Image (cartoon, rainbow, N blue to C red):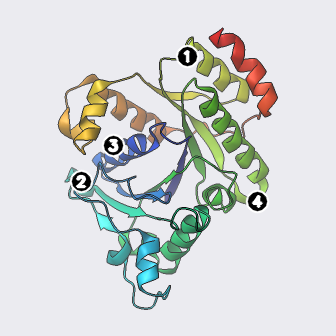
Amino acid sequence: MRQIALYGKGGIGKSTVASHLSYSFAEKGMKVLQMGCSPKNDSTYLLLPDFPPTILDVLRKNDFMYDDLSPEDIIATSPLQFENGGKIYCAESGGPEPGVGCGGKGVVEAIDTIKKLSIFKALDIDIVIYDILGDVVCGGFSLPIRQGFAQETYVVTSGEFEALYQVSNVSKAIKRFETRAGSKLGGLIVNLRRVKNELQMVTDFAAKIGTRIVGVIPYSQTVKQCGGDGETVFQCAPNSPEANLYREIGQKVFHNKNLVIPNTLEFEELYDWWLPYIN
């Protein structure tokens, strides 16, 4: 079974990328589990008719007892139909109420529940995609890397400084736990934000940290419109350039063997490198 972690700063488009990857893998006949790892439950909204209950909410209702739980209690099956046996399953970790506790705690509890209920085996999962809230400083959000669940990690980024800084944070986590966990960086997926010299900047940045760009997503009103309708571009604009682009990115991730331990940059070093591109 293949396990993929998808990181990036908040609002960068991770969930949109994750959902399109899930769809493209299911088209290949894979059984995919997309797991949203944040206090919200909106990672899988492009794949389901409704927002599913979070794993943490289900656990609370059952006093954190696992004996009476079944996979159907925490896993939602997407109604999307695929040939060759492809199927998408969805899960959302959830988290505490704002101001009450650490959001990463929900990720820890959710992954523990997935393991205790033997979800991967029960559903015969081929690929897991962890869609993870950007801040890997918190131990919970770094869990897929730290514990070796995700053997390959991709970061959705742009030319914004905060987005590149997040790539550096993820790179540090991969490097810190490389011996114990074995996770590696598969590359960057660039979601352009119309920053000055953006594509050249991110291309140079990828080379600097020793990785590559897997795909470049231009600003697209089609993607926004489809997202607003709660659908992937594969559903609402199947013949669009955007659908072809996301399918191409899915192909590159699916066949990617170029996994690396990235170089890292400190905050000041990254800022000094980044500033000339926008001036």
Q: Position of residue 164 (x, y in %)?
A: 64, 31
| Vertical side of 145 occupied by 244: above or below | above
* Mark 3 or mark 2, earlier in chain: 3
Query: Which is nearer the N-term, disc 4 or disc 3?
Result: 3
Up-down relation of residue 249 to residue 124 (above or below):
above
Q: CA distance from mark 3 to mark 2?
A: 13 Å
Q: Which residue is mark 3?
A: 24
Q: Is disc 4 surrounded by few (<14), some (14 to 19) or many (20+) residues within 10 Å?
A: few
Residue at mark 2 to residue at mark 1: CA–CA distance: 40 Å
Q: Given contact means CB atoms under 8 Å apart, are the residues at marks 2 and 4 in contact?
A: no
Residue ID for mark 2: 84
Q: Are marks 3 and 1 in contact (CB under 8 Å)?
A: no
Q: Classify 10 Å Cα crowding around label 2: few (below 14), some (14-19), many (20 and above).
A: few
- Find out whether the residues at labels 3 and 2 contact each other: C-beta distance under 8 Å: no
In the picture, residue 85 is in which quadrant? bottom left
- The residue type indicated by label 2 comes to Asn
Q: Which mark is residue 180?
A: 4
Q: Of all residues shown, which one is farthest toward the top?
A: 279
CA gap between label 3 and label 1 equals 27 Å
Which numbered dot is residue 198? 1
Label located before the other in sequence (4 or 1): 4
Foreground label between 3 and 1: 1
Q: Residue 264: image x %, image y %?
A: 77, 35
Q: Disc 2 vs disc 1: which is toward the camera?
A: 1
Q: Residue at x 65, y 12 (%)?
A: 277
Q: Earlier in the sequence, mark 3 or mark 1?
A: 3
Q: CA distance from mark 4 to mark 1?
A: 35 Å
* Type of amino acid under label 4: Arg
Q: Is any part of residue 243 visible from this angle? A: no
Neighbour tally class for label 1: few under 14, some 14-19, many 20 plus, Cα within 10 Å: some
Q: CA distance from mark 2 to mark 4?
A: 37 Å
Q: Give x and y (percent) for residue 168.
A: 70, 36
